[in-house]
């Protein structure tokens, strides 16, 4: 166990800029945008929300806020925070993809694979530590930055409402559910498991090809084209797109991303398509192990 923890710490240290620093940088930028929106200097429009302070000049909007029930208030706050945090989660997704693609490639490039294979640590442990970082540890790393962003935003909104005489300072906090953070981390972990075949494929491409980006994309494009030409179907493309997007249960009927409930996690483990992805990921991990053992830098002899 101590060896695994050491390997995980090593991964975080080597890729700290993407996995650790990037979420906080994005969070600071988003906090700045929240302040600018509150001051009326910026208006941000998304597919689901328009973040602007100008709407509160409308008496009907103020009246609605003052009479709204707690459940509706909670849903509005929850959806707003999800939309606000999406840029950070998108950055985290790209950071995980970049990490997955480069982690095995970098050890070949700088020949550090010689050092790691000289240590009393199995290849299986090294591969598992990298999978663990991408699927489990990375969401835990981004969570504090996400919590800080949401708390800062709620505080800024509360101050704005109070000094604008719209609602009381505690209007937001009365409805906010702090148990949502459990749902956030569970949702991120479930998404990581759902995307595991993509993560494993990127790692395999990094371990095998001299140009990992081309090696990761070209075979997939070839399969899509060949299936379309030979069979006139898009089954592979559809499954690939599903794995690149949020797990279907994390998207509501109105196509809004939402938190999953604890009871819904069982639905993931009861679907055959999930286990097909796990089996495919295991096969890729075995292939990575084989490729690393056959590398020209795999031995210190």
Image (cartoon, rainbow, N blue to C red):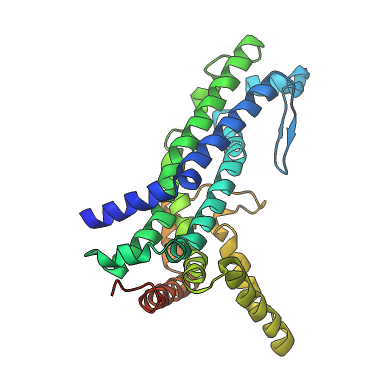
Q: Is 146 rendered above or below residue 168?
A: below
Q: Is 125 rendered above or below residue 188?
A: below
Front-most of residues 97 and 291: 291
Quadrant of the rendered image containing residue 116: bottom left
Q: Residue furthest bottom?
A: 230
Image coordinates of residue 11 in percent, x first then y, are: 38, 53
Residue drawn at 66 percent across, 79 percent down: 222
Q: Quadrant of the C terminus?
A: bottom left
Image coordinates of residue 115 in percent, x first then y, are: 31, 63
Residue drawn at 58 percent across, 15 percent down: 159
Q: Quadrant of the N terminus?
A: bottom left
Residue drawn at 62 percent across, 75 percent down: 220
Q: Residue furthest front?
A: 301
Residue drawn at 33 percent across, 66 percent down: 114
Image coordinates of residue 212 in percent, x first then y, are: 56, 68
Quadrant of the rendered image containing residue 133: bottom left
Q: Say left or right for 119 vs 38.
A: left
Front-most of residues 62 and 242: 242
């Amino acid at each position: 166990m101590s060896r695994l923890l050491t390997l995980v710490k090593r991964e975080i240290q080597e890729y700290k800029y993407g996995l650790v620093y990037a979420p906080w940088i994005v969070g600071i930028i988003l906090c700045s945008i929240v302040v600018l929106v509150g001051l009326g200097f910026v208006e941000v429009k998304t597919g689901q929300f328009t973040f602007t302070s100008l709407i509160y000049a409308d008496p009907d909007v103020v009246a609605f806020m003052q009479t709204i029930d707690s459940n509706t208030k909670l849903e509005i706050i929850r959806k707003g925070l999800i939309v606000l945090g999406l840029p950070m989660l998108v950055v985290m997704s790209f950071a995980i993809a970049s990490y997955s693609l480069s982690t095995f490639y970098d050890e070949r490039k700088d020949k550090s694979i010689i050092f790691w294979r000289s240590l009393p640590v199995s290849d299986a442990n090294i591969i598992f530590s990298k999978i663990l970082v991408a699927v489990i540890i990375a969401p835990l790393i981004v969570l504090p930055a996400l919590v800080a962003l949401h708390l800062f935003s709620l505080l800024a909104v509360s101050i704005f409402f109070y000094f604008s005489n719209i609602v009381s300072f505690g209007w937001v906090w009365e409805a906010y559910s702090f148990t949502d953070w459990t749902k956030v981390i569970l949702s991120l972990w479930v998404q990581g498991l759902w995307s595991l075949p993509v993560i494993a494929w990127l790692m395999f491409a990094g371990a095998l090809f001299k140009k990992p980006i081309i090696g990761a994309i070209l075979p997939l494009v070839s399969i899509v084209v060949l299936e379309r030409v030979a069979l006139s179907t898009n089954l592979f493309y559809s499954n690939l797109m599903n794995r690149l997007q949020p797990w279907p249960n994390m998207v509501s009927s109105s196509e809004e991303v939402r938190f999953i409930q604890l009871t819904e996690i069982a639905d993931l483990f009861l679907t055959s398509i999930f286990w097909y992805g796990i089996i495919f990921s295991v096969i890729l991990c075995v292939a990575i192990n084989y490729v690393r053992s056959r590398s020209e830098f795999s031995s210190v002899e």
